[in-house]
Image (spheres, rainbow, N blue to C red):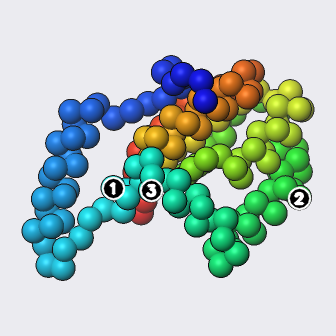
């Protein structure tokens, strides 16, 4: 991996993030039953472990999604009107699945920006750096954030 692509990554203000972390951990451990937000599991080691889990035969969802995108990624991109657009991915992780959309889009000279959103800072740093190096013509703007209902 090359250096961090600093203009490719939106990070929450570190002081605000540390304050929020302390508040959420304190609240969670003071409650009954004790809880912690799942986003705290996704540091560098946790993200790597989750990626390993998604490759297990028992965790079939990722394999099914990847197969659909391998078969249909080019068809999906061909349905997008020929104008600039943003490709947004929630829970991007290591970007394995989205490659099946990025490559046909770039091969077809589509003009778009990829906006991966993930709660793991380390996963996002790795992904944005790797994609910027692998596809220099691709606009990448990684966002570290929680999302949900």
Q: Cα distance, mark 3 to mark 2?
A: 30 Å
Q: Of marks 1 and 2, which one's residue comes earlier in the chain?
A: 1
- Give the percent coordinates (x, y) of residue 93: 57, 50
The label nearer to you, 3 versus 1, is 3
Nearer the observer, 145 or 136:
136
**What distance separates the C-alpha of mark 3 from that of mark 1?**
9 Å
Which residue is identified by label 1?
40
Mark 1 vs mark 2: in front: 1
Quarter of the figure that contains the N terminus:
top right
10 Å crowding of disc 1: few (<14), some (14-19), many (20+): few
Image: 77 above or below 110: below
Q: Residue at x 13, y 62 (%)?
A: 27
Q: Residue at x 60, y 61 (%)?
A: 52
The number of numbered badges drawn on the structure is 3
Query: Compared with residue 119, is residue 29 higher up or lower down, i.e. above or below?
Result: below
Q: Callout 3: 10 Å neighbours few (<14), some, many (20+)? A: some
Q: Nearer the viewer, mark 3 or mark 2?
A: 3
Read off the residue under disc 2: 71
Nearest the eye: 148 or 16: 16
Could you tell me residue 133's position as x and y percent?
68, 24
Secondary structure beneath label 2:
helix
Residue at the spot of label 3:
46
Q: Earlier in the sequence, mark 3 or mark 1?
A: 1
Toward the viewer: 130 or 103? 130
Count residues near mark 2 (Cα–Cα under 10 Å), then give few for <14, some for 14-19, many for 20+.
few
């Amino acid at each position: 991996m090359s250096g961090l692509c600093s203009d490719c990554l939106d990070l929450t203000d570190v002081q605000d993030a540390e304050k929020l972390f302390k508040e959420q951990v304190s609240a969670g451990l003071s409650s009954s039953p004790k809880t912690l937000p799942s986003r705290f599991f996704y540091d560098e080691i946790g993200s790597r472990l989750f990626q390993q889990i998604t490759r297990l035969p028992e965790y079939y969802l990722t394999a099914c999604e990847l197969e659909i995108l391998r078969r249909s990624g080019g068809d999906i991109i061909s349905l997008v009107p020929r104008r600039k657009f943003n490709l947004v991915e929630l829970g991007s992780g290591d970007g394995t699945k989205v490659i099946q959309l990025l490559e046909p889009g770039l091969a077809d000279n589509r003009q778009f920006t990829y906006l991966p959103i993930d709660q793991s800072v380390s996963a996002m740093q790795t992904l944005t750096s790797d994609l910027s190096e692998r596809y220099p013509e691709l606009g990448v703007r990684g966002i570290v954030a929680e999302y949900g209902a």
